[in-house]
């Protein structure tokens, strides 16, 4: 078990260029690049972005306050009187609530933010409960606007009447210091440690360093459009460097956590993605070893599933193609073996024919020369010489006829003419016609079958089969010299046996008995006068009839047999 796990992990980590490792490496590199990008953006662009945002707020505050001041000025009101009136009204509201012993709601304290219509309505109901329904909602005052920017954006606003040099309003506790500061700016005695951000027609926005508080401030100072009211808006700038460091530290912690958990998640995700790919890899390895019985099994409909189905189709087609090639190769191999076998048989046939013809030709030539030279002067010797020549010529003629018959049968040119006949009667006729030869061989022939047995075959060719079997039996008789012929019907066939007493045929020679010119007698003597073609003709005739033939060794002799189609 440990060895299997060790091999598995070794295979996993030994693949340096696996898809899983590539995806993991890409993910880690992307996360690292993102963290570095955020760190660089914080370092190089966060401060600029922060200052730009504060600059917009400063410009917005000036535009809104300036619009309200110009509205009051155009209505013929004095700004100092307007602010004093709004302050006095707020303190009256606050004093009435305090005398009644009520808890002053936050919205009833001198406002520090713009009030909604509901809040204004509640103020109206407090002053005049009976006429709340008929009173209109109060509009936002100049003090509301200034205090709104003071609370929401931490802007300290100082308004100074340029004619008297006295402060009109200060939203912070350092009104005297700020008032002196704006007057110094106007007189051109400002701090040298300043950087101008933007200059407008009536005011300037700067960044100044305050040595007293050791802090940076964004300050906007100048005149409103009434050319009388001098102002200073001061906004402390937080330590951008410290903010950047905190942001980078926070992003580093978050990035590391995301990187760790993301890597773990990516490991399982890539495992799910690469698992079917590894399965396809193992499938391709087995296909490369010509094992096409394997297949990819998965229900996924994505690109990997399509690839797996394509590999299954490829495997099936390769299996069919290679199977066809193997069959063709086997057939080709078989054809080559048959060709070699035919060549060997042709060589053997030529050798056998030459051997069979050599002796009779030599005898004919010798006796013919003797007759020509007058070696036989008496009539008896000449008659003997002529009989020998005629006998050998007859044997040669018989062998040639047998070869022609065998050739016609094997080539299919001598197809059997099927007819229905009684094989029992054919056997009796054959015995009768061969009676003289049987007597010469001193053979005892018995026929066991007496009842008619009708068969469908070529009667003349079956007679030749019986003749060859009978001649073969008489040529190999021994012992009691009995020949027994019997026939029997077996279902839809008729089987005929020809038995003779004699020595058994060696088992190793039985398969070769049907080969042309094959003789059990290795010396190929001329004792029986046979050429070794008769049994080959029997085999060819049986093959033409699509029937079988064979031979068996019995205790007292040898029995040849063949089958025929039974007729009704």
Image (cartoon, helix red, strand yellow):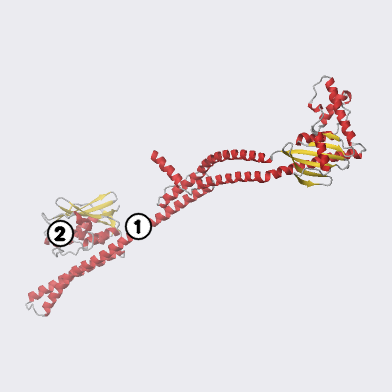
- Residue located 25% across and 59% down the image: 539
Q: Residue furthest top?
A: 101
Q: Which mark is residue 344?
A: none
Q: Which mark is residue 330?
A: 1
Q: Which mark is residue 474?
A: 2
Question: What element does badge 1 sit on?
Answer: helix
As drawn, 238 above or below 464: above
Out of 415 and 25, give the one closest to the viewer: 25
What is the CA distance from the residue labelled 1 to the residue labelled 2?
44 Å
Q: Residue furthest bottom?
A: 373
Question: Crowding near pointer 2: few (<14 within 10 Å), some, many (20+)?
Answer: many
Choose top left, top right, bottom left or bottom right for residue 564: bottom left
Out of 243 and 526, give the one closest to the viewer: 243
Residue 152, horizontal then vertical, whole percent: 76, 35
Marks 1/2 in contact by CB < 8 Å: the verdict is no
Mark 1 / mark 2, whichever is N-terminal: 1
Q: Can residue 415 be seen in this snapshot?
A: no
Residue 33, horizontal then vertical, whole percent: 59, 46
- Residue located 27% across and 60% down the image: 541
Looking at the rendered image, the quarter that the N terminus falls into is: top left
Residue 238, horizontal then vertical, whole percent: 71, 38
Question: Crowding near pointer 1: few (<14 within 10 Å), some, many (20+)?
Answer: few
Q: Is residue 166 left or right of residue 283?
A: right
Choose top left, top right, bottom left or bottom right for residue 188: top right
Q: Can residue 167 be seen in this snapshot?
A: yes
Question: What element does badge 2 sit on?
Answer: helix
Q: How many marks?
A: 2
As drawn, 428 above or below 7: below
């Amino acid at each position: 078990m440990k060895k299997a796990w060790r091999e598995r992990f070794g295979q996993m980590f030994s693949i340096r260029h696996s898809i899983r490792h590539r995806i993991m490496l890409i993910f880690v590199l992307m996360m690292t690049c993102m963290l570095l990008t955020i760190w660089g953006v914080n370092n190089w662009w966060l401060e600029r972005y922060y200052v730009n945002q504060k600059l917009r707020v400063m410009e917005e505050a000036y535009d809104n306050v300036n619009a309200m001041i110009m509205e009051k000025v155009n209505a013929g009101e004095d700004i100092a009187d307007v602010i004093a009136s709004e302050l006095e009204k707020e303190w009256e509201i606050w004093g009435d609530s305090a005398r009644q012993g009520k808890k002053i709601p936050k919205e009833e304290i001198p406002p520090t933010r713009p009030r909604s219509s509901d809040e204004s309505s509640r103020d109206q109901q407090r002053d005049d409960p009976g006429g709340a329904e008929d009173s209109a909602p109060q509009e936002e005052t100049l003090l509301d606007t200034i205090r709104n920017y003071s609370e929401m954006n931490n802007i300290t606003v100082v308004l100074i009447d340029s004619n008297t040099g006295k402060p009109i309003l200060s939203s912070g506790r350092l009104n005297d210091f700020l008032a002196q500061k704006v007057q110094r700016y106007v007189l051109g005695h400002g701090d040298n440690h300043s950087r101008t951000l933007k200059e407008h027609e009536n005011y300037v926005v700067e960044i100044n360093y305050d040595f007293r508080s050791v802090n940076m401030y964004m300050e906007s100072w100048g005149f409103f459009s009434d050319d009388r009211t001098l102002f200073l808006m001061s906004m402390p700038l937080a330590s951008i460097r410290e903010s950047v460091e905190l942001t980078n530290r926070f992003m580093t912690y978050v990035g590391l956590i995301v990187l760790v958990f993301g890597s773990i998640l990516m490991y399982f995700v890539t495992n799910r993605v690469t698992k079917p790919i590894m399965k396809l890899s193992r499938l391709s390895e087995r296909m490369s070893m010509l094992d096409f019985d394997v297949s990819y099994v998965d229900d996924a409909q994505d690109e990997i599933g399509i690839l797996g189905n394509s590999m299954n189709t490829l495997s099936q087609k390769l299996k069919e193609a290679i199977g066809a090639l193997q069959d063709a190769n086997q057939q080709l191999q078989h054809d080559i073996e048959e060709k070699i076998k035919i060549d060997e048989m042709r060589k053997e046939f030529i050798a056998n024919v030459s051997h069979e013809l050599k002796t009779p030709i030599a005898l004919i030539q010798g006796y013919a020369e003797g007759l020509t030279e007058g070696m036989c002067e008496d009539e008896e010797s000449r008659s003997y010489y002529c009989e020998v020549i005629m006998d050998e010529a007859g044997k040669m003629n018989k062998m040639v006829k047998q070869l022609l018959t065998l050739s016609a049968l094997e080539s299919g040119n001598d197809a059997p003419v099927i007819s229905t006949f009684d094989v029992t009667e054919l056997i009796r006729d054959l015995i009768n016609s061969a009676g003289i030869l049987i007597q010469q061989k001193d053979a005892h022939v018995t026929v066991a079958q007496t009842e008619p047995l009708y068969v469908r075959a070529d009667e003349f060719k079956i007679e030749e089969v019986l003749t060859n079997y009978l001649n073969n039996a008489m040529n190999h008789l021994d012992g009691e010299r009995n020949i027994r012929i019997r026939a029997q019907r077996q279902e839809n066939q008729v089987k005929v046996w020809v038995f003779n007493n004699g020595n058994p045929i060696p088992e190793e020679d039985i398969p070769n008995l049907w080969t042309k010119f094959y003789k059990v007698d290795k010396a190929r003597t001329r004792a029986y006068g046979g050429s070794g073609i008769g049994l080959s003709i029997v085999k060819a005739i049986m093959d033409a009839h699509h029937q079988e033939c064979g031979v068996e060794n019995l205790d007292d002799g040898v029995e040849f047999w063949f089958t025929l189609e039974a007729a009704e």
